Amino acid sequence: MSVDTQQVPTELEEDELRTLDAHWRAANYLAVGQIYLMANPLLTEPLRPEHVKPRLLGHWGTSPGLNLVHTHLNRVIKARDLDALCIWGPGHGGPAVLANSWLEGTYTETYPDITRDAAGMARLFKQFSFPGGVPSHVAPETPGSIHEGGELGYALSHAYGAALDNPGLVVACVIGDGEAETGPLAASWHSNKFLDPVDDGAVLPILHLNGYKIANPTVLARIPEAELDDLLRGYGHDPIHVTGDDPAAVHRAMAAAMDTALDRIAALQRAAREDGVTDRPRWPVIVLRTPKGWTGPAEVDGLPVEGTWRAHQVPLAAVRDNPEHLRQLETWLRSYRPEELFDEHGAPRPEVLACVPAGTRRLGATPHANGGLLVRELPLPPLEKYAVEVDKPGATLHEPTRVLGDLLEDVMAATAERRDFRLVGPDETASNRLQAVYAASGKAWQAETLDVDEHLDRHGRVMEILSEHTCQGWLEGYLLTGRHGLFSCYEAFVHIVDSMVNQHVKWLRTTRRLPWRAPIASLNYLLTSHVWRQDHNGFSHQDPGFVDHILNKSPEAVRVYFPPDANTLLSVADHALRSRDYVNVIVAGKQPCFDWLSMEEAEVHCARGAGIWEWAGTEDGTREPDVVLACAGDVPTLEVLAAAQLLRRHLPELAVRVVNVVDIARLLPSEEHPHGMNDFEYDGLFTADKPVIFAYHGYPWLIHRLAYRRHGHPHTHVRGYKEIGTTTTPFDMVLSNDLDRYRLVMDVIDRVPGLAVRAAAVRQHMQDVRQRHHVWIREHGTDLPEVADWTWDG
Amino acid sequence: MSVDTQQVPTELEEDELRTLDAHWRAANYLAVGQIYLMANPLLTEPLRPEHVKPRLLGHWGTSPGLNLVHTHLNRVIKARDLDALCIWGPGHGGPAVLANSWLEGTYTETYPDITRDAAGMARLFKQFSFPGGVPSHVAPETPGSIHEGGELGYALSHAYGAALDNPGLVVACVIGDGEAETGPLAASWHSNKFLDPVDDGAVLPILHLNGYKIANPTVLARIPEAELDDLLRGYGHDPIHVTGDDPAAVHRAMAAAMDTALDRIAALQRAAREDGVTDRPRWPVIVLRTPKGWTGPAEVDGLPVEGTWRAHQVPLAAVRDNPEHLRQLETWLRSYRPEELFDEHGAPRPEVLACVPAGTRRLGATPHANGGLLVRELPLPPLEKYAVEVDKPGATLHEPTRVLGDLLEDVMAATAERRDFRLVGPDETASNRLQAVYAASGKAWQAETLDVDEHLDRHGRVMEILSEHTCQGWLEGYLLTGRHGLFSCYEAFVHIVDSMVNQHVKWLRTTRRLPWRAPIASLNYLLTSHVWRQDHNGFSHQDPGFVDHILNKSPEAVRVYFPPDANTLLSVADHALRSRDYVNVIVAGKQPCFDWLSMEEAEVHCARGAGIWEWAGTEDGTREPDVVLACAGDVPTLEVLAAAQLLRRHLPELAVRVVNVVDIARLLPSEEHPHGMNDFEYDGLFTADKPVIFAYHGYPWLIHRLAYRRHGHPHTHVRGYKEIGTTTTPFDMVLSNDLDRYRLVMDVIDRVPGLAVRAAAVRQHMQDVRQRHHVWIREHGTDLPEVADWTWDG
């Protein structure tokens, strides 16, 4: 690679060293103050027990290291007029990032009552980890943050997501050596094989080895440095080391490391952008080794604390009751010489702020961290272009996801210049039949390419890596910085990111309550290759429970859709892509599926979220139904329509209503979910007293959990996936789980009172037919033509 | 390191090369046959469409590579009389492992109808991926397997789990380059820092780079070999490369690589065991580069297939309809020269079997892969030793998990020689207050140790790494090979392994139906640091939904317990540790908690799973209750008892029943779960018609989903966690989520008909008290003494 990576290391002037150290000391002082103090913030009087909070909560251990990084990021941002964002992986070190935000002024701009003076400092201290105050972590409430760092593992994939399609941005990413042990973090190092040095920005990982987790040494801190270097080079990086515990020496080394790293980044970008170099860059990584709880108490109660795991949270635990602890705390606080750092009003002195950049260059003020400020409407074309023709229901078949692929192709094309839309997935875009998008954008790829490869593209915006964690992290980072996207995933394996989406919904729930946080594009899942069609893979690939997980989360931020055909999928996807601040889950099949609704009908139906399909039942406007057949999901809809057809043939006198549910939260009471129906609406669809046979895509009890308060609930019988499956035919799957059309007819006969005597014979016939299918499938390995070639005769 | 790693590479004799190649060709032939054929297995007649299955399902791409590894493992096992187990990470290559099992005879021993002759071969072929047959993956049904490989990422952690405390065992582990991109796999490379060369066996990772996933190249196949070597060395391994597509050359290289690797392993073990070397070994890793779909069709329909992603599943897709495809299939099958491999009866010829070891040395027959054959009763001491004294309920406080720690210490001590019990957790053993175990066993650690470290131990059986995935994978591998263990985890973050436990429950559901699979020890979770006590961490650490996820899984294999105090925790843990073939989830707090039940009472209560606490209500044996206060979980139990006390004071005429639920599945109907109650029992506890106020630990709708069929369900009102939280006081958490004692009293007043007029005033008083708490907490940052110092006066 022809880049000039050997810059002369920075020699800090004594003046600059002094101001950097002053900034760092100020941040450290403010961090300790937040953990301990509720009064006397400037130590204008001797520290007394009543100045100390009654409950001491927070994480000191990582804070001085984060403060060091922040100080030095300030320096280079200011010196280079850098557009930068920082992901604080050890986000539990909230006191550090809050301290820096207060110092640079963004905290006061965001929360005007936390002024940059003694009174504001007192409030800053007291509110930390205090009821009614702010959380102990870097949180949605923290200016400049897109990453909480509570659940570890996602810092680096968030950083890459932020850097994608932001060519002018440098995303620094602090990775704690604890977090570095997690799987998601370990996988995300390879993100550099997907980062385009031309169209994307840069990520500067800063691996912070302070040696300990909560109670144990960390793996990466306890392997020889040469082995760590091998690892980082194996990840595709060039390591730069900063090691020490002498502040002045570390400041010098850190300044030099930052300059070296940023010079290299600039050179690599220049080479790719100006000289047309296409070698995959070896991006720098900084390895920062400083003591855990650096500058804190060296020993407490005779045990070493600084530089050990004992510094993880609150090093002095009994300050209110133990005079020696109180004395140690005062000594510790005064060691930062607050009188040099803050003026008599409590404002930071100019020297402290000398390194701080201005305006939106400040890390707490970058609009990238408040992506809603940057997000633009996605250019979504009219759906008519992609809609499938439906003259009458069930006359034609389409693969819904393939139809959606055509829409996504045009979204990709329409954002070719703007570059603010990405499709992510674990190597399944084509398997999920969305491959039309490749005509508009290839797959991002910076590693070696062979002639036989297809659709690989240095500048592609389709992202495929066999790591659901990395896909999710990239997309979250991308959305949080103001862009749009879709995650297409096998339904069963989206559980891999259960805990990640958990954190994202928590983030959205909180940001929705913060007026200064502008709404961002929703996180959209397309779950396909679903439970009913795992012909190739069987039981291990069958799990429809992600929806249950999502519906446990804050109702204001979660939406779940089961479009039953191609046009409804288009409508739902269009709605999801336009929406803000949600997690939208769309479950849709990739296999050929009957087209039930025209585009116009689909839009009306999806807007309602649930509705009667008059054409499918016996509705004539005069009769109450004897039974309601309800369905949610493509396969259940097919089985319900087939059951309705059987009923029409075998029990023509029966009044049957067919209700299709697209938006599953409609079943909830309106006070439980914004999309919930009131009882009047619900009874209008499902009746208050007639039997309801509900064929549902997933675990049947979800429907009960949603509808248990309804008048009609005692009469509602749900069929769904009962955790029975293997490698078998599609119809064998519904048979095994009692979701098949014949079973549904039997359910109707079992539940509708006063049926003709003949019904018993019909029931027996259905039972016989089921047995015939069972035997045939085991003998021939295929479904019987009467289901494989079934058609709707309505 | 003073080990002789430079052995002279093996020179294969021509004879051995021929027999190895014959074995490999036979396995390849059988793999193709399984994917395609339902008749004419030996090609004794020209191939016709009707010989071919109507649905072609399976994964060819990885199969020839797996067959190569199996053939060469056979060779070294036989040559060295090796005790070996293999984890097939690319387990979707089921045809390969099934082929080998049939060849070595274990398949016929396990399934006698699949004989080792033409008729058996025909059945072997037809049953594959066929309804009523066997799944397409290496599955529980596959002899010799402990790992499905359907959901990728867990191969290596399973391998390490199997190797722990099996000093004589070598666990080979094939890692596909697709799987290598996942987070869990990436993290698990560092397992070698926890593998004791003295007391544990060895793991030999075989990274199989065939270059492609489903539709994309893989990252590790497309970085320069030097960079890959850096990575593997960074993981602590010494790489050995085998690359090629010429079978003879690859056989020679693979035999040499296997010998080199096993010689190194033996030398490293000898050094540690005999010479007392304590340096962390650099274990070998084999990097095997062979084409995807090797020996399959080079081109199909004019497009390259062998060596590309197109070989992933079924290379020739239209064999029944396309004569050219049929011809290609026949050519492909005949290219293995089946007549040389199988005799006229279809039995493998002696030359083919020359490399196959005998008896339980065969990979399909090793008892390590059927751990139930090896598992011993865990030596569990009588609980009396650890029980806390309870003269009357609520008079004393204990930290339940700390009490459990004393029991675990003795289990650790009692297994010091047997070494068949491990405790795993993501750096939280001490945080979760189980640190008493360190007195019996330290923490496994082979990396650098400093003087300041505590409890690190080269031979320790406590395993702590900050990766829930790795913890889970280790424990699964350990249990599946016949040992015992417990996973202690923060409640919120156990969601990280949602998808892993999914697969484990699926495995158990299947093995429970296989008579030849002996029951294994249950997978036991202790979930602590739970939602109600995240004082330090707040919202990101609050999620009680793992239980909901678990209860979606097969009822026969899942158990969930909410012990309300120390003695009930002991009883539940004892039961879980004795049990087989379950996933047991125990949710218990680590904070001081009132002791409600004596050990004797606890055992009776836990055996019942749910019961009336007469002493807590107003039961006198004569009166029906006016209201039932039900509780599940330690914090809800406290709030319910406090509410009962308030009711006794303010509405003494009210007949109150208190029901505590430990085993949450008791709420299910008996036909839905083996622990479910029948309606008679349920009504006896909860009444059929009285209001039930249910204070539940987690999301309230779970109780509705479990109890919706009960007579009393319409009168049941549930309080629980509503996804509201932050860093705050414990009582503020229950207040915010309406689970507090005062709110419960208000719920009672709102729902019990015919209360005295005075009740309205009591209700208002409760409301006022709640407001007073709210204000106090925000002002002082602590809970009011009336809750912080509350005592039970019963």
Image (cartoon, coloured by chain):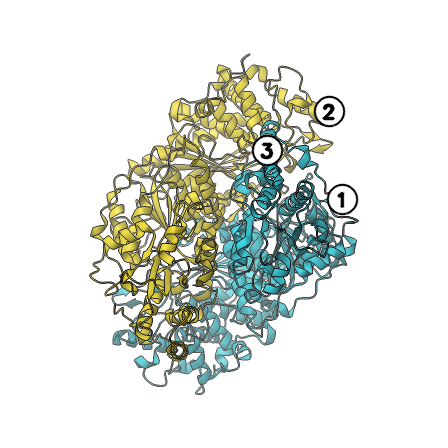
Chain colours: A yellow, B cyan
Q: Residue type at mark 2: give it.
A: Pro
Pinpoint the chain carrying mark 3.
Answer: B
Query: Which residue is tagged 1?
Result: B395
Rendered image quadrant of residue A34? top right
First in sequence: mark 3 vs mark 1: 1
| The C terminus of chain B lies in quadrant | top right
Nearest to viewer (mark 1 / mark 2)? 1
Compared with residue A131, is residue A15 higher up or lower down, i.e. above or below? above
Mark 2, Cα crowd under 10 Å, few <14 / some 14-19 / many 20+, is few
**Residue B706 locus on image (x, y percent):** 54, 58
Query: Which residue is tagged 2?
Result: A323
Q: Residue type at mark 1: give it.
A: Ala
Badge number at residue B768: 3
Give the SS element for disc 2.
Answer: helix
Mark 3, Cα crowd under 10 Å, few <14 / some 14-19 / many 20+, is few
Q: Residue at x 41, y 35 (%)?
A: A171
Same chain assignment for discs 2 and 3: no
Q: Is residue B727 visible?
A: yes
Q: Is residue A255 visible?
A: no
Q: Nearer the viewer, residue B137 or A389?
A: A389
